[in-house]
Image (cartoon, rainbow, N blue to C red):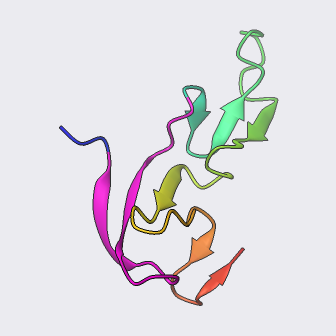
């Protein structure tokens, strides 16, 4: 079974369909990593942006040209 989805979105660089999956970082939850989990009295007080998905919660890429599209906005055709 594949661990990614084939999207209907086309790569802006080569036109190939993109692939995506939920962030593969083990501690990532919706784009954030709770650094305070060791402190059970104050959970969620130290959440940092996940470096793998850049806070989006998903990873998106082009399998053809290899372009990382995690931070690409397909509506405006711009990377953010």
Q: Is residue 58 left or right of 27 when viewed as pictured?
A: left
Percent position (x, y) of residue 49?
Answer: 74, 44
Q: Nearer the viewer, residue 63 or 50?
A: 63
Percent position (x, y) of residue 25?
Answer: 57, 33
Q: Is residue 53 above or below residue 27?
A: below
Q: Which quadrant of the view contains residue 41?
A: top right
Residue drawn at 40 percent across, 56 percent down: 20
Percent position (x, y) of residue 39?
Answer: 78, 10
Q: Is residue 16 magenta?
A: yes
Q: Nearer the viewer, residue 66 or 2?
A: 66
Q: Which quadrant of the view contains residue 70?
A: bottom right
Q: Is residue 79 magenta?
A: no
Q: Is residue 56 above or below residue 35?
A: below
In this view, the residue farthest toward the front is: 65
Percent position (x, y) of residue 56?
Answer: 59, 55
Q: Is residue 7 left or right of 59 when viewed as pictured?
A: left
Q: Is residue 47 above or below residue 17?
A: above
Q: Which residues are magenta?
A: 4-25
Residue drawn at 35 percent across, 77 percent down: 16
Residue drawn at 63 percent across, 66 percent down: 71
């Amino acid at each position: 079974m594949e661990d990614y989805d084939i999207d209907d979105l086309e790569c802006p660089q080569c036109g190939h369909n993109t692939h995506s999956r939920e962030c593969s970082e083990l501690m990532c939850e919706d784009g954030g990593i709770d650094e305070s989990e060791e402190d059970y009295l104050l959970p969620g007080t130290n959440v940092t942006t996940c470096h793998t998905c850049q806070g989006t919660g998903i990873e998106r890429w082009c399998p053809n040209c290899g372009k990382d599209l995690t931070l690409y906005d397909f509506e405006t055709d711009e990377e953010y």
